[in-house]
Amino acid sequence: MKKLFLTAMAFAALMSAPVLTSCSDEDEPGGGGGGQGEAVEIGGGALEEDMTLDATKEYLLTGTLTVPDGVTLTIPAGTTIRAQKGFDKYIIVAQGGKIEAKGTATQPIVFTADDESAAEPGYWGGLIVNGKAPISGGGTSAAEVDNDQMYGGTDEADNSGSIQYVKLLYTGARSSADVEHNGLTLNGVGSGTTIDHIYILEGADDAIEFFGGSVDVDNLLAVNCDDDMFDFTQGYSGKLSNCYGVWEAGFTSTEEDPRGVEADGNLDGNYPEHNPQSDFTIENMTIENLSDYEMNDAIKIRRGAKATITNALVKGSGPISDLVDMTDSKGVADNASVISVTTENAATDVEMVYVPDPEDDPDGQTLTCTATVDVVSGNAGASQSDFAWTGYAFGASSETPSVVTETLPTDISADLTLDASKVYLIEGSVIVNDGATLTIPAGTTIRAKEGFANYLLVAQGGKIMAEGTAENPITFTAENEADAKAGYWGGVIINGKAPISGDNAGTLGSTEINNDFKYGGTNSADNSGVLKYVRILYTGANSSDEIEHNGLTLNGVGNGTVIENIYVADGADDAIEFFGGSVNVTGLLAVNCDDDMFDFTQGYCGTLKDCYGRWEAEFVSTEEDPRGVEADGNLDGNYPEHTPQSDFAIENMTIENLSATQEMHDAIKVRRGAKASITNALVKGSGLISDLVDLTDGRGTADNASDINVTNEATDVTTETNKGTCTATVTVASGNTGCTLDFAWTGYNL
């Protein structure tokens, strides 16, 4: 196998562990996979310096990868790490080390087996994080799988990094019956660590186990894990929220007493005198058994643990011995525990008294717990929709979760409502015709095949009702996200009947990418439907340099249409372009779009509010003059006599250039008769910007009644204001805050 060392690693690091090499798919164990062309080997020792992986590459874990004190491992969104088979194939973050694994809903980070065709629970180790937060007994303790690695301490707020939108598949390898990996092991991890949106599938031990510490975990899905779904011990004092554990039909366990929740106050119940004892919270939890295998307890709290569990739901057709069990021979649960649970399963038993078996424990004492256990009706448990990003289909009847994919019809002439549990494919030009409504429920994913001809167009008189939510957005993306880039597919186009600039009232325009579809008219209040909480990714395919898609194209769209909370990323042309019309758009985040962030033309007369455009550090444009704002009064500046000319407003806007190499032609360009009212605008970033505001053009300046108020916090602006002969008002003021809207729903970290 040819070995190619990464040039980013120092020579000394290359001569010692961990080794990083690349190998062809042909050389990879199990044939590799992912279509990346090469896999970079990691593992075999401790990092000697910070390491940042590359999401365009695939990684092969060939041994133990240790992130030691003072070192950070950064794993970008969309990265896949495949592990060879074996107990020693795992990643451990030592005390003082950090992992920054920040996936997104559309580009999660995936840890899986190198040969998924042969993968099973216990194929490889898992992910372990060791922190400095308190554990019961004080001091430190040795990690189960590596006694040389310690955890615990006195820093409750210890920060071991971030783990977000991460999938952990086929974990739990063991060296003995007593020494085995979990999916995610959190040893004394502090509350300064961020952990949310975790998916653990087919693990051979617990899905997640907390050994002390104070870290909170939010949004955790555990499917077919062999022992406990959620395990707490050794003085854990944080909170687990919105967690769902499920055994599917056909699941069987190799363990003696697998459970939904298992909680000990101290390590193995052998240290009742230790402090602190576990004192933790679970909010919004579902435990579901669909298998024929008996679950020992849905909720087991014991050995001095204090649990506050609210909005818990136990469901499924499979057997469960005890709904709640608060007893154990080594001590019952803390009497201050409070549990509220609804059962939709046959299990109803609540065990509060431990009575020793004389044969097993002739000297044992009867132990009674007086904690509060309320079996109530109406608890909803975890929100399934919050796990849409995983691709998991709830209610699956086999060990391998499946998602049904359907191809959208290209001709939608009657009302059509999609199903959020399915994935839909755009193959060809999908047209929503006059009189038809396409309804897309929250959480739906629509993938497009590669190519210019693959797009969605809502024709005049048609409607789209795409109402996502912050917790459950609608996503338009590439069919193959692993190979996706800007320009992969077309985009989303809406054609309305609102006025556009022309030589007479009711002028019609022809859609740029398909001249057979018209837009424009006389109805400013025209209603083309709703777009809320919608993500549009990898758009901008072109048929020529002059004909290319935007992310979202609004052609003569009326203000009866509702467009709020839109995310456009990695587009090969503009993020959004308004061709006339009067529609208002609120809450728009545009990231790494190749031409303009916000483009207005052909008589647009609405308002764009709370908008943020960003180029990241490595962004490079293929366009000659990419901008933040580009505004023309009429189409291409060739029709200064047309009415109406663009007369629009922008409120609360941020434009940010962080690119190390790409010059932004203008942050704000208003020209060719356009009248703009721009308030609370902020321009910032370290990248070069030629003009902060430019109101000039060879085909006409901005309308003299334009009024622009902008704050400049950019560090490299060549010219602040270029007005030429235009007498419009441009105020470069301090104190503008720009867009302060929270875009956390997108999965993108501003």
Image: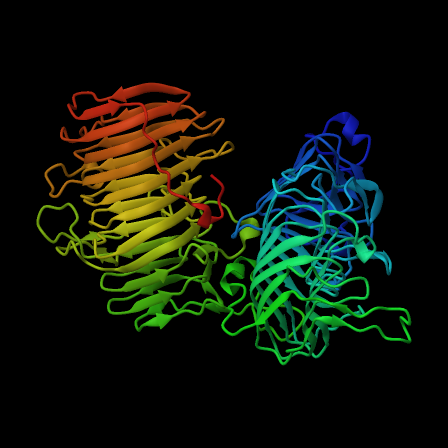
Residue 39's x, y, as percent?
A: 70, 45
Q: Which residue is drawn at 37% across and 33% down?
A: 655
Q: Let me know if residue 341 appears in the view.
A: yes
> In this image, 349 relative to 501: left or right?
right
19 w.r.t. 212: above or below: above
Q: Quadrant location of residue 519?
A: bottom left
Residue 6's x, y, as percent?
A: 71, 33
Q: Residue at x 19, y 58 (%)?
A: 526
Q: Let me know if residue 542 appears in the view.
A: no
Q: Which of 388 and 482 is in front in this view?
A: 388
Residue 579's x, y, as percent?
A: 24, 47
The type of colouring in the image is: rainbow
Q: Quadrant location of residue 458?
A: bottom left
554 w.r.t. 734: above or below: below
Q: Residue at x 77, y 49 (%)?
A: 27
> In this image, 139 relative to 98: left or right?
right
Q: Which of 452 and 642 is in front in this view?
A: 642
